[in-house]
Image: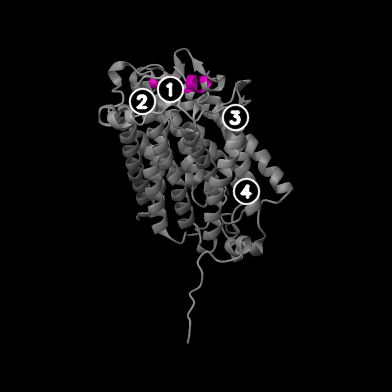
Amino acid sequence: MRSTARMVITAWSRRTRRSRARKVGFGLFGVLAAVLLSATPAVAQELTPAEYNAALLTSLWLIVAGCLVFLMQAGFALVEAGLTRAKNIGNIMAKNLADMAVGALAFWAVGFGFAFGSDGGSLIGTDTFFLSGMSESFADGDVLATPSFFFFQVVFAATAVTIASGAMAERTKFSAYLLFSLVMSGFIYPVVVHMFWHGDGILSDLNIGDARFSDFAGSSIVHSAGGWAALMGAVFLGPRLGKYGADGSPRAIPGHNVGFVVVGVFVLWFGWFGFNAGSELAMDNWVAHCIMTTLLAGSAGVVGAGAVIWRKTRSMDVGMAGNGALAGLVSITAGTGTMTFAGAVVVGLIGGVVVVYSVMFIERRGIDDPVGAVSVHGVCGAWGTLAIGLFAKHDDAFLGRDDAGLFYGGGIDQLTVQAIGVVIVAVWVLATSAILFKVLASTVGLRVSAEEEMAGLDIAEHGSPGYGPETVSVG
């Protein structure tokens, strides 16, 4: 087995070493045995049939979960398009398309190596570029050294990049955004992954006594990383024309299609079941647990955000309620395997409340974030990571113990460790993305001209409107 594969297994094996009483194994073996045994290839002769079938089913689960996460790109595109103006819909769709295409190529070329290659200084991987040495088979039962694992990881990378798209909407040069997407998916985000999910990074080694840092599916590793990059993008770009009055007070710039927003939220919610439950990396009984905590936290987020905005405005802001769902989902992503169902409801509900106040706070500070990406992903990602220190009941195999949360008698150490991890991720992404945006602004330019912004980026950047005029043929 390649040394890199061993490191990958080390990073993830804690998650699959739950006690025997908490595991049910692969329940599909009996049903699928006849089919799978007849199809077992010669390369698997080193394994018993049961071991090969286990590897095959693990690969199947990673691919299915990865396809669900892949679909989240469509959800992000719809939410961003719906919350912005019609004159920019083509540009928004182009950015989301580029995030997947550019991100996949960058992650294949260098990103996966930086994330999961041999450790260098507990910060970055140093080999496995272009997936060199990656096996196509399960000959040794190591699914995490095959393309199945790469596929599951690359869709996470695309998610982290796409988060920033919404905060930079309606005024960013397409060429500058492509370069940001390339660097974010190829370098900035993979280093965050290496810090924790590789197994030898500074976050995976972070502990105070028995308390060890945990972020099961990426509230900070994915969502806050994308959120802090989004914050830097919005700061360097400045607000959209007309967003603030002469006295500095913010003005509403309504989106053009609330239907897109709600459908996009449901697409994202659907994909999140793969995002969180797929991070278990095995089809066991904890998959259903993660799906349940995801469902409940997202639902509570809608209620939390809806209640706050109703109390403030005496009406239901559908866009804000949708962001409440996403806030609840982001909030539970870190602790989806650690929390009880009741804990997931509380964490999601608080996330929904937090996102409303965060959106208003950021807007009052002169930072124009058209879709609330910084609040949903950056702020709520931080909250979700901290929430483990309060509500963690079960061992997610990163924690290494049950009852780690403060409310279950785990003490303050877990909350402290989680806070340190949040700060480390924030400092890295804020610093590197600030440097990147400064370089882009000084070279290719970051923002379109005022005339192009007024006309809409569909025309200025792509040559035609996203919504074409109707034509009538006569004769």
* Residue bearing the label numbered 1: 141
The amino acid type of the residue labelled 1 equals Gly
Residue 54 badge: 2
- Please give the range of residues in magenta: 6-16
Residue 132 badge: 3
Q: Residue at x 57, y 29 (%)?
A: 115
Q: Residue at x 56, y 30 (%)?
A: 192
The amino acid type of the residue labelled 3 equals Ser
Q: As drawn, which residue projects farthest toward the right?
A: 443
The amino acid type of the residue labelled 2 equals Ala
Mark with earlier residue (4, 1): 1
| Mark closer to the observer (4, 1) | 1
Q: As drawn, which residue projects farthest toward the left?
A: 31
Mark with earlier residue (2, 4): 2
Q: x, y percentage for residue 130?
A: 60, 34
* Residue bearing the label numbered 4: 178
* Left or right, residue 134 beside residue 26: right
Q: x, y percentage for residue 473?
A: 48, 81
Q: x, y percentage for residue 384?
A: 43, 33
How many angstroms separate mark 4 from mark 1 (CA)? 38 Å
